[in-house]
Amino acid sequence: MNTILQTWGLTKTYGTVKVLDSVTMTVPKGSIYGFVGKNGSGKTTLMRIVAGLVFPSGGEFGLYGQTRKAGIPAMRKRMGAVIETPAIFSNMTARDNLKAQCHIIGCDGSRIDGVLKTVNLSNTGGKHARNFSLGMKQRLGIAMTLIGEPDFLMLDEPTNGLDPEGIVEIRELILGLNKERGVTVLISSHILPELSKLATHYGFIDRGRLLKEVEANELDYHHDGKLEGYFMDLIRVKIQ
Amino acid sequence: MKNLIRADFFRLFKDKIFYLLIAIAILLPIVANGLFYFGYDIMVEQSPDAEALEKVLKFIKAFPMSMYAFEITNSAGLLAVVAIALYVGKEYMSGTIRNKIIAGYSRMAVYASNLIVSSLSALMIVTVFIVFMLAIGIPLQGWGAEETLTVCLRQYAAGFLITLASAAVANMIAMLSRGIIASLFINLGVVFGLAGIVSIVTMLWDVNTMPTVASFFMKAVYMGQLTFLSTDFSVEFFLTTLASTVVVVCIISAIGSAVFKRLDLD
């Protein structure tokens, strides 16, 4: 199985508004898939559908090759997701947050120290998450997903609002997870130069429609790696 | 499912608001008993018809246990509803409900786990309230006439049942309102709204002479049960409470989980 996530004609409508319009995309195993699109283009909605938070209006998707609705929840146990804001308990410490997540997924607490070290939150002690910086909260959100040892991560705008140092930390974390542990990552970001430092594959989405999927090396060869220009060209072609 | 319940209890016992509500459940009996015990003489002294008031208070003092039974869910039940509204609402606020879905749990399991933990936390608050009410009340006001014991125990049991019914309603509202503020306001609105409706209906009509369906509905409405708890000591009332609690919990949870199953989450 070379594909982690695949969608076929995935559609979501809210009333008469089509937020996702027949999206067919493929996230290859071991890739860092950069999901590029403007605000409101449907990136988060697609991630929410895959995470089971929102139900599609049409089309279907497969996780690890599993396409049956009944079988997908079991597959979700192998993935992790941080969608929009990190899902953490602000009244708990980083360690207690991970303990709570351990209870949910049914793991013992032996991985907690390792995960805290991975996301560089080992020395936060008794500090509650509400007092964390944005970058620390983001890293804790990722840590919550890592405790289950996922092989697929969905990160929605993980560097949004972070300072340059925070952005570098998240980038190194993602690259480390991908290279050292073989974790496949689907990542959406507005910061295109930053995304180009990570992604091995891209999917460009606009107004709910997937415009194109390309590999990073293909983009480098034809467009000198200029992600922004390529995306704007795609939109221009679509309008014409 | 076992893991989910364990995780929910872990979260509950880490929540300061839960302990605050437990503290209020301890404080209320202290204040209520203190006011009643120390205010007794003052009330008699200042009453325009001191003789009549003294008779009433003596009567009340002869049955302190049964009097306490009235207060159980009226105050502690409200605390329990607040606890559930905040407990479930916080999960939406923090977004942590997403962690359960992404971890592969079915919507039904998430709903059921919250219902179980909400119900047990509500019972904990009510139990603390009763224990302190009795622990402080009995030394101050005595145990009461022996024949009232069975009645009182039955009323307490009815109080627990009502708590379970109100927990099911509060949990459903909190799960479907998808936010802490909405959860709290809608829950309190429903509690006071129903209390108001029941008060108006009981003022205008005799519930016992109503058609069976209307009478049953009035008694099945959980805040309605609170009103009847303080006036109806019959075995029939207890059995109606038992039956209506089962009906309320089953119907409300079935509706709640069915809607939650189809709900898009943020």
Image (cartoon, coloured by chain):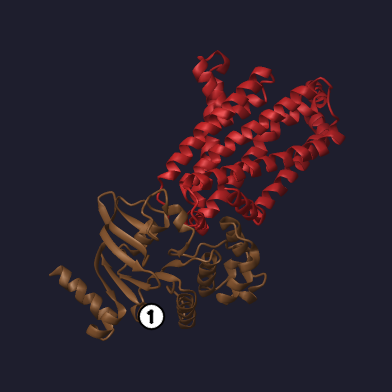
Chain colours: A brown, B red
* Percent x, y of residue A122: 62, 75
The answer to whether residue A15 is above or below residue B47 is below
| Crowding near the residue tagged with mark 1, few <14, some 14–19, many ≥20 C-alpha atoms within 10 Å | some
Residue B154 falls in image quadrant:
top right
- Give the total of numbered labels: 1
Q: Residue at x 45, y 58 (%)?
A: A76
The residue sitting at the front extreme is A1
* Percent x, y of residue B77: 64, 38
Q: Nearer the viewer, residue B209 or A94?
A: A94
Q: Amino acid at mark 1?
A: Glu
In the rendered image, the quadrant that contains the C terminus of chain A is bottom left
Residue B61 falls in image quadrant:
top right
The answer to whether residue B246 is above or below residue A181 is above
| Drawn side of residue A19 relative to residue B5, left or right | left
Residue B100 visible here: yes
The answer to whether residue A206 is above or below residue B86 is below
- Name the residue beneath numbered marker 1: A194
Q: State which chain disc 1 sits on.
A: A
| Drawn side of residue A91 relative to residue B210, left or right | right
| Drawn side of residue A94 relative to residue A182, left or right | right
Residue A213 falls in image quadrant:
bottom left
In the rendered image, the quadrant that contains the N terminus of chain A is bottom left
Q: Residue at x 87, y 35 (%)?
A: B139
Q: Residue at x 52, y 48 (%)?
A: B110
The answer to whether residue A34 is above or below residue B260 is below
Q: Nearer the viewer, residue B252 or B99?
A: B99
* Percent x, y of residue B224: 58, 28
Residue B186 visible here: no
Q: Secondary structure at mark 1?
A: helix
* Percent x, y of residue B117: 61, 45
